[in-house]
Amino acid sequence: MGCLQSKKVEENYLLQSLQEHERGINAMAVSEDGSVLATAGEDKTARLWSTKTEQCECIGVLRGHTDYLNCILIEDCFVLTGSADKTIRKWDVGTCECLLILTGHSSVIYRMICTGDFIFSSSYDRTARAWDFDTGECVRVFRGHKRGVYPLIFIPADQDDDEELEVGTPKDILITGSADFTARTWNFETGQLMKVMKGHTGAVTCMSVDPTGRVLFTGSTDFTIRSWNLYKGSQLKTFEGHQGSVICMTVVNKLIYSGSSDHTGRAWVAEFGDCTRIYKGHKHTVSVIKVYEGMVVTACGDTVVRVFDAKSGALKRTMKGHTSTVTAMQVVDGKLFTSSYDGTLNVWDVANIDGDSQLRNYVAVQNNSGANNNNNNNNDKAKEKHKMNDVDKFGGLQDIPGQVKAKEADRIVID
């Protein structure tokens, strides 16, 4: 019986496998309404896909770059692509025509974010740049990092903050993370450096902020996550536990979710630095981590996508179909879209995960078996339950009624 239900966990939920790209896929983006998906490839092309039709289909190919694509965005009716050819291109979604070519970086474009009015890019050339969205003109260059610039965050002005911030504090802030072990904040209006966050002993690979936009979280190859007072530049907490580089991170209310080269995902209470859950079972680096309807979804270098219950850490589904590292994920209407270095775009069914009663029975059997085999686990489980009660109290998995948010999440732009 246990074996049968174990197989249920590994059932293949693959709906489609699309192999239009000629080489690996490095990045993915989805339109605001979820109807169009865009992928960026090693084959120097970007491709557009329909997501809400019965079958996902390629509806456009964007050709023009002379080297592989690293990043991609959809903004309104336009697609933005960043490439190793040192350029950013702006495309029309409807016609697939290239409208603008943004030149200025002297090395690979690593990441991009867009506010609607401006495009921000980071590069191995040690700079970040801001570009006018309509004209493609470079309006700011942010210089100061001593190695390549990786993740980006833009925090816009908030009139409600005027009385709370110190006199002279800039309204619009760009945050950059770098291989030089630092994160830096910049005054967007002047391009001037504000604060340097020093403390990591490895490259800053990923960043996020809390819902208020006042606390910065940085993940690093030094195995740690650190939190910082964004406006003072001072370190608040060090999150220790990972045994490998922190590769990806997302913040949901008061919880941080991280993925690492130590083959695990973890959940942390942002305010206190406590690790509340470890998501195990991966056989390689956790390359992407997302939270979806109370589930933690991970993409991994072992080619597998896994779905865990966020609170219990129980494995709900494993999805096997890729043959190389899974590089990106997006969820649209109960379908999970995943891309990989194997060049495929896979579409998976992630609807009604909670409805799988056989799976819940399997998890229950496994938990009971573990308790019977080792009575000492009872104390550990009680501690874990207490931790998760704290997490619930802090509002990690759901919005807190009446909670005041200084900045709405859709106004803070994270790569």
Image: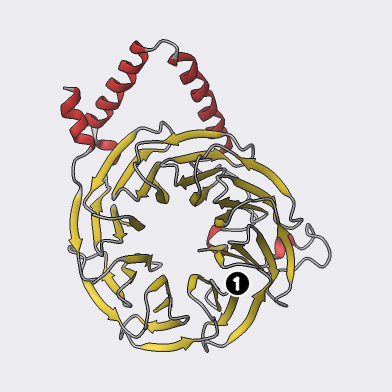
Residue 81 location in percent, x, y?
A: 41, 76
| Relative side of 248 to 327, left or right | right
388 above or below 170?
A: above
349 or 229, nearer to the observer: 229
| Relative side of 346 to 293, left or right | left
Q: Is mark 1 on a helix, strand or loop?
A: loop
Residue 343 location in percent, x, y?
A: 26, 65
**Which amino acid lies under the numbered mark 1 shown in the image of this protein?**
Arg
| Relative side of 2 to 243, left or right | left
Which image quarter is the N terminus in?
Answer: top left
| Relative side of 293 to 389, left or right | left
225 above or below 18?
A: above
362 above or below 412?
A: above
84 or 97, nearer to the observer: 84
254 above or below 31?
A: above
How was this image coloured? Answer: secondary structure
Q: Which residue lies furthest to the right in this view?
A: 167
> Which residue is rendered at x = 56% and y = 81% of the image?
131
> Number of labelled discs?
1
Residue density around tag 1, few if under 14, some if 14–19, many if 20 or more, within 10 Å: many
Residue 181 location in percent, x, y?
A: 63, 57
> Which residue is rendered at x = 75% and y = 66% of the image?
194
Q: Name the residue under label 1.
A: 126
Residue 32 location in percent, x, y?
A: 41, 67
